[in-house]
Image: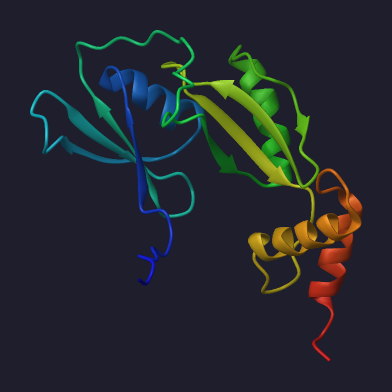
Amino acid sequence: MDPIQPNGVHHITLVGADRQTSIDFWEGVLGFPFIFEQPNLDDQNENHLYFEPGDGRLITVFTDETRTPTGKRTPRSAGAVHHIAFNMTRDGFDAAIDRLEGRQIKHSGVKDRGFMHSIYFREPLGLTIELATYTFELPQGVAHSVVLKRAFEIRSASGDYAIAQQHLDQAVAELSSPAT
């Protein structure tokens, strides 16, 4: 049987607290423009807010004025969302650290993941948010996933534990070379 084969993420919907908490975080802290709102068509007690995270897709939030933010870590049980990661340019990533600190938002500090740098913090309802920036430049016309797949193959063949800079450098060099 053939796979279903979606062609990308359409949107992600989160369960929020009150309307203003969502607007203050998603638009005020992360800078995702507030696009529109309407009732949650499946639950008349909720509102549905739509934000644009920078790639034309949507992050949406169901809000209910009777819910309040707790800030407690969201569940880590099977089927739960661990975190949502957003891609950033290097300059934007560096500026985000200063902006989080300026807002007195606790964060993890920069984590080196080999192929990317990340910083983690929680939004008001306890969901972990990751801001990430790749540590390599893309060859023209090549997607990040293509570079990462090739770096993984190189890493696996060498028996190394995780993708490191040398694997990325080799993958980028190979993918930058004209086909022979």
Q: Residue at x 36, y 47 (%)?
A: 11
Q: Is residue 156 above or below residue 109?
A: below
> Farthest residue in the left direction?
44
**In the drawing, does residue 58 fall left or right of residue 134?**
left
Q: Quick check: 87 above or below 180? A: above
Taking 1 as reference, is 100 above or below it? above
Let me know if residue 168 appears in the view: no
Image side of residue 119 versus residue 162, left or right: left
Task: Give residue 20's quadrant in the image.
Answer: top left
Residue drawn at point x = 65 percent, y = 18 percent? 107
Between 152 and 66, which is closer to the camera in this rendering? 152
- Where residue 61 appears, as percent x and y from the top left, is 31, 32
Residue 172 rendering spot, x and y as whole percentages: 82, 66
Question: Residue 43 at what x, y percent from top left?
Answer: 11, 30
Residue 147 visible: yes
Residue 117 location, quadrant: top right
Residue drawn at x 19%, y 11% is: 66
Q: Nearer the viewer, residue 48 or 104?
A: 48
Residue found at the very far front of the displayed protein: 1
Residue 1, picture quadrant: bottom left
**Left or right of 96 on screen, residue 55:** left
Locate residue 4, reporting x and y percent: 35, 65
Residue drawn at the location 63% of the way across and 44% of the way down: 88
Q: Is residue 85 left or right of residue 35?
A: right
> In the rendered view, would you say 177 is above or below 55?
below
Q: Quadrant of the C terminus?
A: bottom right
